[in-house]
Image (cartoon, rainbow, N blue to C red):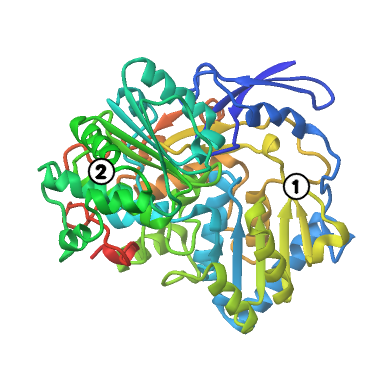
Amino acid sequence: MAIVRSQCGQCALGCGIRVLTGEDRDLRIEGDPTHPANGGLLCARGRALELGEGLDGRLLHPLVQGRRQGWERVIAQLARRLSAIRARHGPGSIALHVGGGLLTEDYYVANKLMKGFFGSAHIHAPWLGDVGRLQRAAYGEDVMPGTLEDVGRAGTILLLGGQISRDHPVLIDRVQAARADGARLIHVATAGEQLGPEADLHLSIAAGSMARLIGGLLLHCRDAGVAKAAGLVVPDGYWDDLRRGHDIWSVARACAVPPATIRGFYETWVAEGRAVTLAAGTDRATAAAILNLHLAAARIGRPGTAPFLIGGGANGMGAREVGCMADGLAAHMGFDAGALDRAARFWGARDLVRGAGLEGEALLRAMRDGEVKALWSIGPDEAASDWLREARALVPLSIRATDRGEPDAGGWTFQLPSAAWIEKDGTLTGMDRLISRQRRLLDLPGEARPDWWMLTKVAQAMGWGDAFHYEWAADIYREHVRLTAYRNDGARLLNLKRHAPISNPAYAELTPWRWGEVPFDEGRFATPDGRPRLLAPGDQTDAAIP
């Protein structure tokens, strides 16, 4: 028997777990009372990890065209075929799909190999959504401005949609505790959605009207003299455009809610300077409206004030921190000349990508056109199952790293046995910048291996062993940390330099820690001029940053 502190990994909240491990892969799981994200609370999905210890349906050995082969031979074949495709068709001929359940170390190695050595930024990660893009456009950097502790410091909590109540019950427990301590809770949901927790005000609005409701609140702030944040960059004509269709009566008609109710909601929110907004699964327009509201009303950069846009994936923040996506480089860097030079030098890159890659339907079109010849898919991603089914049939070389076997090899050229969540070892970042250790609860069964190990071995076989020398997850963590600090003069908030010299034993004992202190607390943002940007409709991408 042993007690291991690890991570739940079932959503972006980042809850810690305390696990009693026994013989025959037996586990007893409870919430970790010492972890800042959940303080001992744990929902049903976390407790269900106990059911994941079985080996039924597991992929335990590498398969090539459905036939079992040893790792040494598989690695050699992968290196040979990827090298041939890249040499014949160019760097953009290789693509990557990543699921949301990988660790930061997995994402780091995958991103480095793709962008620094394959020379491709074609990374499909649909679960990431628009949160990172919008925060980069508004703040200049993809930084969650608040922490979970801000929920308990808020005077007013605005809860949007029914998805949070369904998917993040531990967060709802924190919200209810804040309400018991005197915070006012306003819950807005589309008619027919889950009602959610007991609130001081419930608004049931018409489908598709959430962005209109929040835009109207911003206009009300403007008319009440609240929306006057210093230094805010406002697009030309923004306030005039907002005024059309966002007065209280127009909003009331769109939402199918009486005007008096809308006015009461707006006045309640405006009256409280400490306001937190929680939203998950919102559309792009609503997410942009939330960021605009908090920026314009200066409800950001202070304790108890923050917009929380909860992204998908257990480690979505970790993936975004290392840049494992189509439209970023690494360590919160873009594709400007300075960032390209830093990454090339630090990585010793052989063929550094020069710009953003393809994803989604655009990537599928490139496969249909024969421009992309190889796809490596890593990690579970149920939402992308249809996309993967089509993509693997379009490319001559398809590689699937997964912990679950598929009948008849599922149509994949290679199937590689990877670790299940409870067998992973590394780090992940919760939605509020809290980095925690995921510790292996069970030994790897059969020939299953971590995803970073597979990527590293292929890179070594392709002749890049000097840049991929990792033996332990701690080696990757140290390199990731050093890259965030490399030539970082303070322009980027993501700087993990305090952990640059971390030893293997210290990494093994790592306790949760948060980077970034209180972002934007002095009113300075990560844009070139230090000023935040309001997001205009149709301009809610990185192009909004000059």
Q: Residue at x 50, y 69 (%)?
A: 350
Q: Residue at x 24, y 29 (%)?
A: 274
Residue 482 as seen in the image, left or right of residue 246: right
Mark closest to the chain's N terminus, 1 or 2: 2
> Answer yes or no: do the residues labelled 1 and 2 have beta carbons within 8 Å?
no
Residue 341 as seen in the image, left or right of residue 371: left
The amino acid at mark 1 is: Asp
Q: Residues within 10 Å of mark 1 (few under 14, many from 20)?
A: many
Q: Would residue 322 be visible to someone looking at this image? A: yes
The answer for how far apart the CA atoms under marks 1 and 2 are is 42 Å
Q: Residue at x 72, y 63 (%)?
A: 399
Residue 294 — which label? 2
Q: Residues within 10 Å of mark 2 (few under 14, many from 20)?
A: many
The spot of residue 234 in percent (x, y) is 17, 58
Q: Please state, as top left, top right, bottom left or bottom right, where the C terminus lies in the image.
A: bottom left
The amino acid at mark 2 is: His
The spot of residue 112 in percent (x, y) is 52, 59
The spot of residue 476 in percent (x, y) is 53, 45
Residue 506 as seen in the image, left or right of residue 55: left
* Viewer-nearest residue: 473 or 147: 147
Is label 1 in a helix, a strand or a loop? loop
Residue topped by disc 1: 403
* Viewer-nearest residue: 349 or 284: 284
Residue 443 — which label? none
354 above or below 207?
below
Q: Residue at x 70, y 36 (%)?
A: 423
The spot of residue 254 in percent (x, y) is 35, 53
